[in-house]
Amino acid sequence: MSRPLLAGLERIAVEDRRGTALVEFAILLPILLSIYLGTFQLIDGSSCKRRVTSTARAIADLTSQYATLTTSQVDSLLTASTKIMAPYAIAPSTVRVSEIEIDGSKVARIAWSRGLRIAARPANQIFILPAGLKVPNSAYVYAEVSYTYTPVIAWITGPMTFTQTQFMLPRRSAKITLQP
């Protein structure tokens, strides 16, 4: 090529800005999409975690309002409490409620337990309580909820498991009796 032709092409390439916005957009699009999808996943995961917390609180609260319960009543309470997880699927959740009794020497044991999609804790099993909760001759309702959250875009973070526990005192009696 001749020197004047090359100089003319260089001038056109330097002065022509028509495709600049398209190139900048193509470079920024993956970054902007990642920020948007990441923010969406963060908000959705946070909402799911709040529902797990609300479910644990609800099952402990509902159970603590009884002086006597039957196993079918406890099972109904467990099933009803999972409705709080809506619009998230119920299948990845596990819910368990137990009563923990502390004897006069501050030894805590499981008095009874029921679970939904998880095994109940064995009766009379020693339970490790925080020191501040070891009040002799008392009882607690102990709720446990676990949920395996799978994000819509699972390749970003993968499945996450949210767990929540809740202690509550029985309201109408010193302890709650479970009848078959």
Image: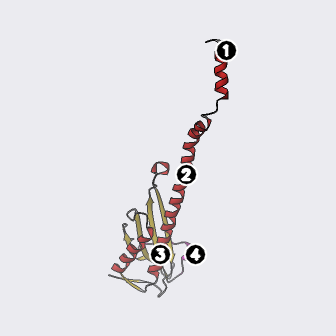
Disc 2 target residue: 36
Quarter of the picture holding the C terminus: bottom left
Q: Secondary structure at mark 3?
A: helix
Q: CA distance from mark 3 to mark 2?
A: 33 Å
For label 3, the residue is: 58
Residue 150 falls in image quadrant: bottom left
Ranked by sequence position, the earlier of labels 3 and 2 is 2
Residue at image point 48% right, 86% down: 174
Q: Nearer the viewer, residue 150 or 124?
A: 150
Mark 4 or mark 3: whose residue is earlier in sequence: 3
Q: Secondary structure at mark 4?
A: helix
Q: Are marks 2 and 4 in contact (CB under 8 Å)?
A: no
Q: Nearer the viewer, mark 3 or mark 2?
A: 2
What amino acid is labelled 3 in the image? Ala
Q: CA distance from mark 4 to mark 3?
A: 23 Å
Local secondary structure at mark 2: helix
For residue 132, the mark is: 4
Residue located at (37% from left, 63% from top): 91
Q: Residues within 10 Å of mark 3 (few under 14, many from 20)?
A: many
Q: Nearer the viewer, residue 106 or 24?
A: 24
Q: In the picture shown, does residue 151 fall above or below 125?
A: above
